[in-house]
Image (tube, grey):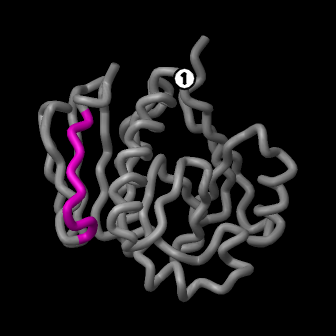
């Protein structure tokens, strides 16, 4: 029997930010997020194919950033505390230098209070599409300027922008642009599928 993922545990405000961070560190073989109501969300690890694809996408973003040095690139294990209180971990993300440099050092070592400027979510076989779409909307509502939801199962890419607009490409074989958020960054997700 397949269990739909993610699984939400109703917690309310039983854990402070520091307690949630310690909880995640004590259970570091599991992946958690937390919604704006304080509920803990148990995430499923990805399968090998999705994990490899995710790695290749993050690597391309990292190569672009190494050449341009406009900020910091993060992988799927990074937690961000959004302005609404949720702690989210996009599959790949980017924070501009000005925001990263303004973060106190203690927040750089925890789930810092910063919303990524750019996020990528890659749908895995266990992910419900509606959950990922809601997560992308939450990122945009909290300050993300550009987001890509790559869905290889429906062969679509959803582009989310700061103006709340969503554009859907009906193929993975399209060259995406980082627009003015990631100037000069281009990615064709279809070319990274093996």
- Which x, y percent locates residue 124? 45, 29
User: Taking the image as drawn, is residue 148 in sight?
Assistant: yes
* Image position of 164 with respect to 191: above or below: below
The part of the image, by quadrant, that contains residue 129 is: top left
Side of 58 where 36 appears, left or right: right
- Give the labeled residue for mark 1: 47
Side of 160 where 92 appears, left or right: right
Q: Residue at x 59, y 84 (%)?
A: 103
Q: Residue 167 in magenta?
A: no
* Image position of 22 with respect to 193: above or below: below
Magenta segment, which residues?
181-189
Within 10 angstroms of label 1, few (less than 14), some, or many (20 or more) residues? few
Q: Secondary structure at mark 1?
A: loop
Name, please, the residue furthest toward the right. 26
User: Taking the image as drawn, is residue 138 in sight?
Assistant: no
Q: Residue at x 17, y 62 (%)?
A: 165
* Image position of 167 with respect to 84: above or below: above
- Which x, y percent locates residue 58? 43, 46
* Magenta part, dominant SS: loop
Quarter of the image with the C terminus is top left
* Image position of 102 with respect to 31: above or below: below
Q: Relative to the observer, which residue lies in front, 189 or 124? A: 189
- Which x, y percent locates residue 193? 31, 24
The part of the image, by quadrant, that contains residue 93 is: bottom left
Q: Residue at x 52, y 78 (%)?
A: 100
Q: Residue at x 61, y 11 (%)?
A: 1
Side of 147 where 9 appears, left or right: right
């Amino acid at each position: 029997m397949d269990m739909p993922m993610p699984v939400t545990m109703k917690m309310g405000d039983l854990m402070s930010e520091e307690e949630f961070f310690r909880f995640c560190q004590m259970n570091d073989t599991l992946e958690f997020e937390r919604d704006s109501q304080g509920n803990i969300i148990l995430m499923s690890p990805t399968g090998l194919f999705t994990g490899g694809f995710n790695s290749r996408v993050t690597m391309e973003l990292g190569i672009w950033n190494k050449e341009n040095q406009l900020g910091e690139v993060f992988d799927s294990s990074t937690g961000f505390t959004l302005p609404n209180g949720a702690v989210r971990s996009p599959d790949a993300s980017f924070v501009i230098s000005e925001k990263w440099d303004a973060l106190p050092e203690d927040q750089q070592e925890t789930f810092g209070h910063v919303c990524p400027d750019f996020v990528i979510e890659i749908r895995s076989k266990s992910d419900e599409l509606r959950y990922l779409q809601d997560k992308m909307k939450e990122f945009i509502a909290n300050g993300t300027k550009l987001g890509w939801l790559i869905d290889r199962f429906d062969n679509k890419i959803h582009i989310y922008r700061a103006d709340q607009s969503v554009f859907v490409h009906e193929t993975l074989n399209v060259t995406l642009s980082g627009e003015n958020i990631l100037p000069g960054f281009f990615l064709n997700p279809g070319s990274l599928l093996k």
